[in-house]
Image (cartoon, rainbow, N blue to C red):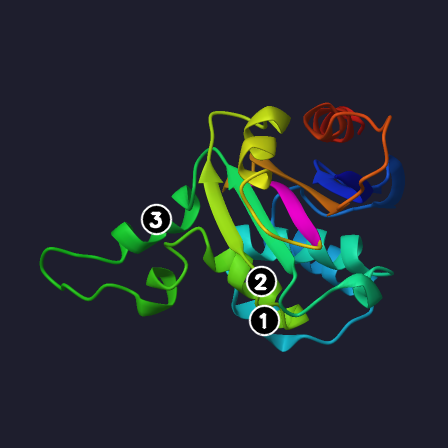
Amino acid sequence: MKIIKYCKIKENRVTVNGEKVLETAEQPGSSKQFKEIYTSLGISYPKFYKMDMLSKLAFLASEYLLMDMRDKLSETETAIILSNRHSTLNVDKKYIESIDDENYFPNPAHFVYTLPNVMIGEISIRNDLKGETLFVQVPSFSGEILKQYLDSMKFKNVICGFVEYSDENNFEAMLTFIERDEKNGIMEISEELDRSYNNF
């Protein structure tokens, strides 16, 4: 396996292959910042505004990642594996707050996003992907852990990475586009993932 491209969103920057492509002016981790990044893409996808913050972050990173890679996507042979530490903690809190002992009425708009694989679903729907998918909750980003799961999956290529959003002060996305590569001498994929994650 070999990383073809990677994208990272953290603090006020968007980087692609380690190079800064956007520096935002809005408060990092805020809805306004995510809208600023969305606007920079020059796309029209109204469903973006209905997503929770975790799904928005995953969507934005995937858009930058796949900007010039969509011709490589395969409906059934492109897989997605994402990980994070806090699952859907941000929207879980909002969902719990919508449940009142005196006026019990859970918010269905929040409930939809209490499953972490929904962010994978948003990427799949946007790109018409129906390959294998997996979400893994991990203590922190780990190329070795992701490699273990990659080794068990079937794919021609895969969108793989770490998307975390617990609040405005704790968010980041790092997505990679990985292809099968049978050539000898390439860096071990777990090391390559770690290198990409740390190159920001």
Relative to 199, does residue 22 appear above or below in the rendering?
A: below
- For marks 3 and 2, the one nearer the N-term is 3
Kindly identify the residue that appears in the image at 60 percent across and 53 percent down. 80
Q: Helix, strand, or loop for circle 3?
A: helix
Q: Which residue is mark 1?
A: 125
- Which segment is the magenta one? 157-163
- For marks 3 and 1, the one nearer the N-term is 3
Give the class, few, some or many, for how many residues have Cα within 10 Å of label 1's Cα (few <14, many ≥20). Answer: few
- Residue 94 drawn at (x, y percent): 35, 52
Is residue 12 visible in the rendered structure shown here? Answer: yes
Question: What amino acid is labelled 3 in the image?
Answer: Asp
* Relative horizontal placement of residue 59, taking residue 6 as reference (left or right): left
- Residue 77 drawn at (x, y percent): 65, 62
Q: Which residue is mark 2?
A: 131
Q: Helix, strand, or loop for circle 1?
A: helix
* Relative horizontal placement of residue 19, taking residue 165 as reference (left or right): right
Which-is-in-front pick, marks 3 and 2? 2
Question: What amino acid is labelled 2 in the image?
Answer: Gly
Gap in angstroms between the C-alphas marked 3 and 1: 23 Å
Give the class, few, some or many, for how many residues have Cα within 10 Å of label 3's Cα (few <14, many ≥20). Answer: some
Question: What amino acid is labelled 1 in the image?
Answer: Ile
* Relative horizontal placement of residue 110, taking residue 30 as reference (left or right): left
Kindly identify the residue that appears in the image at 51 percent across and 37 percent down. 84
Q: Which mark is residue 92?
A: 3
- Residue 44 drawn at (x, y percent): 73, 76
Give the quarter of the figure containing the C terminus. top right
Relative to 168, does residue 36 appear above or below in the rendering?
A: below
Give the class, few, some or many, for how many residues have Cα within 10 Å of label 2's Cα (few <14, many ≥20). Answer: some
